Image (spheres, grey):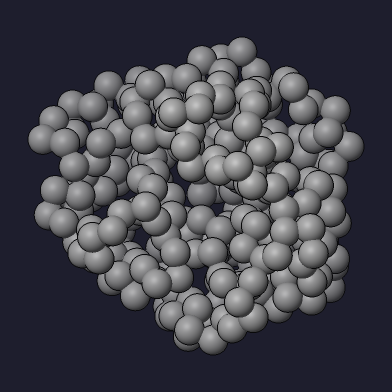
Amino acid sequence: MIDSHQHFWTYQVNRDAWITEDMARIRKNFYPNDSHELFVNNDIDCCIAVQADSSEDETLFLISLAEQSKFIKGIVGWVDLQAKNIESRLTYFSQFELIVGFRHVVQSETDPDFLVRPDFLRGVQLLESFDFTYDLLIYPNQLNAGIEFCKKNSNQKIVLDHLAKPPIKTGDISEWKKYIKKFKELENVSAKISGLITEAEWFNWNEKDIFDIIEISLDVFGRDRLMFGTDYPVVLVAEELSSWISTFKKSIAKLSSDEIKKITIDNCVQFYKIEL
């Protein structure tokens, strides 16, 4: 399988303040080669490395890791999409073949109109001309704004990270479900089946709740617009990697072998245009 969503970092207390005390088990360094055996044992052959810190240094860090490890097949980096010189920054990063797209941590933005800021929209709209993708990271309460954003950028390839983090722990996914269904008609938007168990009760989540979310995603995005991801190492705050992968495999076991291959390999290759 190709893991469409992994993170790597050199842990820094001040920079990585989002890793709270209850997430202590990931308060350490994570590099591609450190977990090679774990990935092999869980059928993960390679990955897309996704930014965790909002800085160009983060993008350069991921490039350096990818140059040392064939495990990383593509990089979703960070660049200030609101910058006045965004076109020159995208020109600079376009020299690195491993950079396939960019992401902004919109879930941390308190401005409800952030996704329609003119400068931000201008930056996102430039991505298409450089053949870069965009990873959309939002919470359920930002879904309506996210839908409008995707409509405004209908020519841009967008992937919804973690299915917009459905509120599994609360037991009420009705609002999330209402909005997620609207993505059915947005053919430029794909989604990652990832980061789900971290939205449930850690180490005490119900497999059926995860199945329900994935079933909804299959109905909305079909077999051609979904890709598998682990969100490693963040997944470790909720469960061991093997448990998430076992649950994921059970959830799609009823699909044909061709459909399974699409979700676990082909869709990621085509979306990010990576070479295996």
With respect to residue 47, does 123 lie above or below?
Answer: below
Q: Position of residue 269 (x, y in %)?
A: 59, 44
Q: Residue furthest right?
A: 41
Going 55% across and 48% down the picture, which residue do you hit? 270
Query: Residue 70 versus residue 65: which sits nearer the camera?
Result: 65
Query: Residue 110 versus residue 273: which sits nearer the camera?
Result: 110
Q: Position of residue 69 (x, y in %)?
A: 65, 18
Quarter the C terminus occupies? top right
Going 78% across and 51% down the picture, which residue do you hit? 239
**Quarter-wise, where is residue 10 in the image?**
top right
Quarter the N terminus occupies? top right
With respect to residue 46, does 259 lie above or below?
Answer: below
Q: Position of residue 198 (x, y in %)?
A: 65, 57
Q: In the visual, does 80 lie left or right of 41?
A: left
Going 29% across and 46% down the picture, which residue do you hit? 128
Q: Position of residue 275 (x, y in %)?
A: 59, 32
**Quarter-wise, where is residue 67 in the image?**
top right
**Quarter-wise, where is residue 104 in the image?**
top left
Q: In the visual, does 270 lie left or right of 228?
A: left
With respect to residue 149, does 235 lie above or below?
Answer: above
Going 25% across and 36% down the picture, which residue do you hit? 80
Q: In the visual, does 6 lie left or right of 116?
A: right
The answer to whether any part of residue 218 appears in the image is no
Q: Count the numbered circles shown.
A: 0
Query: Residue 264 versus residue 213: which sits nearer the camera?
Result: 213
The answer to whether any part of residue 121 appears in the image is yes
Q: In the visual, does 163 lie left or right of 239?
A: left
